[in-house]
Amino acid sequence: MYKSVNEYYRETFGCKVYKLSIDAGFTCPNRDGTLGHRGCLFCTGSGEFAQAGEDVRVQLEKAKARVEKKVGSGKYIAYFQAFTNTYAPVSLLRQLYTAAMEPEEIVGLSIGTRPDCLGEDVVALLGELNQIKPISVELGLQTIHEDTARYIRRGYETPVYDDAVSRLKAAGLEVVTHFILGLPGETPEMAVQSLRHAVAAGTDGVKFHLLHVLKGTDLEEEYRNGRFRCLEPEEYVHWLKLCLSAVPENVVVHRITGDGAKRDLIAPLWSANKKWVMNFLNRHLRDG
């Protein structure tokens, strides 16, 4: 069995830890015209539970209140989730990150970004702040296969990811890599190849996402035109099992599936029932 993020957080922080999503108002080079204007094919860019435009401290307090209403008080990681969260001047990044780190109950930061948006000054800042509270950097690799990467408009080639991981690790930072399972034209074996590549590059953690189609994305048009189909539950479990079998013991599995807001979901509709999905996946993974 793999090491789950809950196990890892308990080992690291001695308690249950919850993530609080933040939308700090960033954009993305794939949207501001630097690389393109429409983003990745599948991307809405937003954090599902974040409130864009609000002060970071206010967002954290609101997110914490939502969590505490369900589970009571605890420790938290501030998760800069929406768009590209290192795509700004270092002076602004320092201000935002330090504000998020200030509350005592925040035990660390998680920063979602692109490998091509990690200049030396940004990595140096992250390394500096990592001495105060632990920081993990989440990179949306999705696939190592260049034909697929071009199709989804990722905007960088795989060696850029490899270089980013190397520099982040040299600065003492934890790296978590995202993969999408079921990308058009890919096979389960191709997904395993992507996973193994990231492990060899030095990733500390992985997140697996089911390819899902959200309203307003360019992927929606591709789906409605019949250019691909989404995985059925049994197929997704098969993909997931193969990938998990290639995850070594020292790499933490932060997520075994991911989906968007139910109100925006076009397909696959079975993924909308999160409780059923998690029970289904855990049962099949447990039973082998």
Image (cartoon, rainbow, N blue to C red):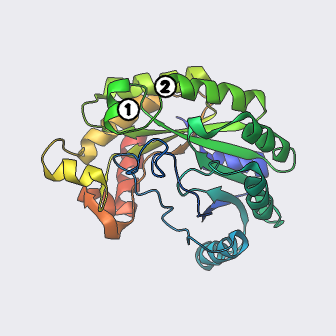
> Could you tell me which secondary element the residue under label 2 belongs to?
helix
Q: Who's the residue at 46% across and 48% down the image? A: 33
Q: Which mark is residue 158?
A: 2
Left or right of residue 252: residue 210: left
Give the camera-side residue of 73 and 200: 200
Residue 47 image point, x, y percent = 51, 61
Q: Where is residue 162 in the image (x, y as percent from the top left)?
A: 58, 24
- Residue sitting farthest toward the front: 33
What amino acid does circle 1 point to?
Ala
Under mark 2, the amino acid is: Thr
Q: Tell me, yes or no, if residue 171 can be seen here.
A: yes
Tell me the number on the disc at residue 199: none
2 and 1 marks in contact (CB < 8 Å): yes
Mark 2 and mark 1 lie on one chain; the one further toward the N terminus is 1
On the image, the x and y values in percent for residue 1 come to 52, 34
| Mark linked to residue 149 | 1
In the rendered view, tell whether residue 204 sits above or below residue 93.
above
Please tell me in which quadrant of the rendered image residue 163 appears. top right
91 with respect to 142 (left or right): right
Question: Residue 203 at what x, y percent from top left?
Answer: 61, 30
Residue at 74%, 57% (x, y): give it.
Answer: 92
Q: In this view, does 5 lie above or below 3?
A: below
Q: Which of 146 and 137 lies nearest the eye of the viewer?
A: 146
